[in-house]
Amino acid sequence: MSPLHNLSEETLILLLKKKNQQAFSYLYDHYANALFGVVCRIVASTEHAEEVIQDVFVKIWRHIDVFDAEKGRLYTWMINIARNTALDHRKSKAIVNEQKNQPLSNIVNREEEQDQSQDELHTKADFIGFRNILDKLKPEWRILIEMAYYEGYTQQEIAEQLDVPLGTVKTRTRAAFIQLQQLLKEYR
């Protein structure tokens, strides 16, 4: 067992800000699977997701000094880094061109892989308990959260995709976040 087992979040952050490598290993061991699940929801392939997760942890290491515990929890901050890095990766020119230039058989196979990775993701999300929390949201709220945070849609794109007014999307998203906050407090 690691000498750093069962660290408080405050202690972990302090050690990370001091660039303690054991603390970083602890962070990776305890959070990589959950963050990988977030990345897999956004990035098309496991290979790309593995590349993105490495970028995520490099960003966490480099930017831990800007983390502010007053603004939120470490896990939430890391999820945002993972989500944004995955979205950036998915929107990068090289990836877009790679996807456009693939033969049809590769696209079909990739869709099958995505279905499998969705199943894996649900398993990983269940592991951290977040899937259970998301499932407690109203279906029309849950879809908004999934589209925005796991698929990278903007609120405007969600409105167009679901054929509902933008104001409705914004109101439902806000309501979903309020309920998520309450559910997460109960979960702790």
Image (cartoon, rainbow, N blue to C red):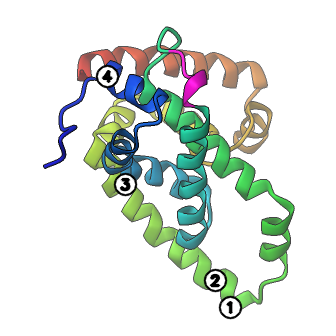
In this rendering, the answer to whether 170 lies above or below 1 is above
Front position among marks 3 and 4: 4
- Asked if the residue at tag 2 contacts the one at tag 1, i.e. Cβ–Cβ closer than 8 Å, the answer is yes
Answer with mark 2 or mark 4, whichever residue precedes in sequence: 4
Q: Which residue is mark 3?
A: 122
In the orientation shown, which residue stands out farthest toward the top?
A: 70
**Crowding near the residue tagged with mark 1, few <14, some 14–19, many ≥20 C-alpha atoms within 10 Å:** few
Q: What residue sits 46% from the left and 67% below the top? A: 117
> The C terminus appears in which quarter of the rendering?
top left
Q: What residue sits 72% from the left and 57% below the top? A: 90
- Asked if the residue at tag 2 contacts the one at tag 3, i.e. Cβ–Cβ closer than 8 Å, the answer is no
Q: What residue sits 44% from the left and 53% below the top? A: 37
Answer with mark 3 or mark 2, whichever residue precedes in sequence: 2
Residue 11: image tag: 4
Q: Which residue is mark 1?
A: 105
Q: Which residue is mark 2?
A: 108
**Crowding near the residue tagged with mark 2, few <14, some 14–19, many ≥20 C-alpha atoms within 10 Å:** few
Secondary structure at numbered mark 1 = helix
Distance (Cα) linking label 1 and label 3 = 26 Å
Segment colored magenta: 64-68
What secondary structure do most residues of the magenta stretch adopt? helix
Residue type beneath disc 2? Val
Q: Is residue 3 left or right of residue 15?
A: left
